[in-house]
Image: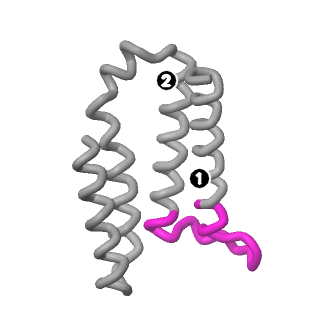
Amino acid sequence: LLFVVWSITIIGAFIKIFWINAPRWVSAGLYLGMGWLSIFVFLPLVKSMAPSGLFWLSLGGILYTVGGIIYGLKKPNIDKPWFGFHELFHLFVLAGTFCHFMMMYFYIA
């Protein structure tokens, strides 16, 4: 799994370097795909992690996914000059980060 994640990371770096005008969905798809690779280790996580830790981990992944979809599609088009899809993407990323922090704080610490 680690090899696959690093391979996708290197591919993503090459895309950013050599295909500067790549559609946004290309990088968003790579990010989301890399994140959802964890589904392959979901059963061991279920067996070894407390339900509350699994809840925070899953909720964070879902929030990151929603944020990635918003980023990739550039939607919804919010009609505010100071708040748009990009700011909404960041809110979802922050919420996902908070969930993963909570998982680490309660489960790992």
- The answer to whether residue 57 is above or below residue 22 is above
- The answer to whether residue 4 is above or below residue 9 is above
Residue 16 located left or right of residue 80 = left
Q: Residues within 10 Å of mark 1 (few under 14, many from 20)?
A: many
Q: Residue at x 54, y 39 (%)?
A: 60
Element at label 2: helix
Residue 25 located left or right of residue 67 = left
**Where is residue 29 shown, x and y percent of the image?**
34, 61
What kind of residue is marked 2? Leu
Residues in magenta?
A: 71-89
**Where is residue 11 shown, x and y percent of the image?**
26, 67
Element at label 1: helix
Q: Residue at x 30, y 76 (%)?
A: 15
Q: CA distance from mark 1 to mark 2?
A: 18 Å
Foreground residue, 88 or 98? 98
- The answer to whether residue 41 is above or below residue 107 is below
Magenta-span inclusion, residue 10? no
Residue 28 located left or right of residue 7 = right
Q: Residue at x 40, y 63 (%)?
A: 28
**Where is residue 70 shown, x and y percent of the image?**
51, 61
**Reading the chain from its start, which is encountered first: label 1 or label 2?**
2
**Where is residue 64 shown, x and y percent of the image?**
51, 49
Locate the N terminus and report the quarter of the image it occupies: top left
- The answer to whether residue 22 is above or below residue 55 is below
Foreground residue, 4 or 89? 4
Residue 93 is marked as: 1
Residue 54 is marked as: 2
Question: Quarter of the image holding residue 63?
Answer: top right
Locate the C terminus and report the quarter of the image it occupies: top right
Residue 31 located left or right of residue 41 = right
What kind of residue is marked 1? Val
